[in-house]
């Protein structure tokens, strides 16, 4: 499948809409609509607000990444994916560790539901190893591979089973592109500007570095939310992305 990441720099910027309630989330949507490519709705916000927050994003003709990391028996996740399609999600994710059958059934269900209602299927991503886990954590859980090996193993399984990409830390971008090809989409969190604190992120890259390494989309939260002028921050990040794309085109 052809890589669906757009070449328009702003469309590659995903804003982490990590707000505790509907009012704050709506304020961010109003402020940043048109300045980011997608709004990422995670577990905290979706639990607090439910589907209506995604509906508000779509009502403003903006794109939504439903970051709920589905992980259950295949039939349950497939039905959740169908609901995500009906909700209008442009991107959603599942845990790759749910297995090949879960991923395949979910991919097929999402495509079929999109065809049934006449919309473009959302981009389905797989989550491999959470960035909060290290080699020791994986060993304690019972995995024999280290974190990098597990990421590649699960990403390959996800690709073979119908996922179109993965969520991956900056450390893994280049390796994933080398092993699985440029058509496999990589969405990368842990993005910081060069003069910004890392906060609790242990492995970070600037937007320029991430796109140069091969990231198709970057997820940014606090570097936008915590500054006095969020719109300016978005413009700076988008310019970083544009510069990286231009440099890649020249190489």
Image: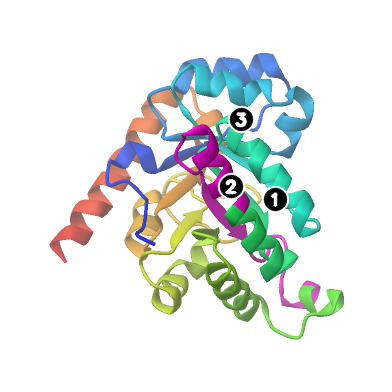
Q: Which element carries disc 1, helix, strand or loop?
A: helix
- Residue 184 falls in which quadrant of the image? bottom left
Q: Is residue 245 visible?
A: yes
Q: Mark 3 points at which residue?
A: 87
Residue where numbered disc 2 is placed: 110
Colour convention of the picture: rainbow
Give whichever of discs 2 and 3 has the lower sequence position: 3
Residue visible at 39% across and 77% down?
178
**What residue sits right under mark 1 in the picture?**
78
**Residue 29 to residue 13: above or below:** above
Where is 94 relative to 84, above or below?
below
Label 2 neighbour load within 10 Å: few <14, some 14-19, many 20+: many
- For the residue pair 206 and 8, the one nearer the viewer reads as 8
Q: Are marks 2 and 3 in contact (CB under 8 Å)?
A: no
**CA separation, marks 1 and 2?**
7 Å
Tag 3: Cα neighbours inside 10 Å, few (<14), some, or many (≥20)? some
Q: Are marks 1 and 2 in contact (CB under 8 Å)?
A: yes
Place of residue 237 in the rendered image (x, y in percent of width and height, measured from the top left): 37, 40
- Determine the secondary structure under disc 3: helix
Question: What residue is shown at x 22% (from left), y 60% (from top)?
Answer: 248
């Amino acid at each position: 499948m052809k890589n669906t990441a757009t070449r328009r720099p702003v469309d590659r910027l995903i804003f982490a809409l990590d707000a505790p309630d509907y009012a704050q989330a709506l304020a961010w949507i109003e402020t940043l609509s048109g300045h980011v490519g997608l709004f990422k709705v995670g577990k905290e916000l979706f639990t607090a607000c439910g589907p209506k927050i995604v509906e508000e994003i779509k009502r403003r003709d903006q794109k939504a990444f439903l970051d709920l990391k589905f992980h259950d028996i295949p039939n349950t996740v497939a039905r959740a994916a169908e609901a995500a399609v009906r909700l209008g999600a442009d991107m959603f994710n599942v845990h790759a560790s749910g297995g090949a059958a879960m991923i395949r059934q979910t991919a097929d269900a999402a495509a079929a539901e999109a065809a049934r209602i006449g919309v473009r299927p959302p981009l389905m991503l797989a989550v491999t190893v959470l960035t909060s886990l290290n080699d020791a954590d994986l060993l304690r859980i019972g995995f024999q591979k280290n974190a990098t090996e597990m990421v590649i193993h699960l990403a390959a399984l996800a690709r073979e089973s119908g996922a179109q990409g993965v969520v991956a830390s900056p450390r893994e971008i280049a390796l994933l592109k080398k092993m699985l090809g440029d058509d496999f989409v990589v969405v990368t969190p842990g993005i910081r500007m060069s003069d910004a604190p890392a906060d609790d992120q242990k492995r970070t890259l600037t937007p320029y570095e991430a796109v140069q390494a091969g990231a198709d989309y970057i997820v940014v939260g606090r570097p936008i939310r915590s500054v006095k002028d969020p719109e300016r921050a978005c413009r700076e990040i988008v310019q970083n992305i544009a510069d990286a794309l231009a440099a890649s085109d020249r190489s």
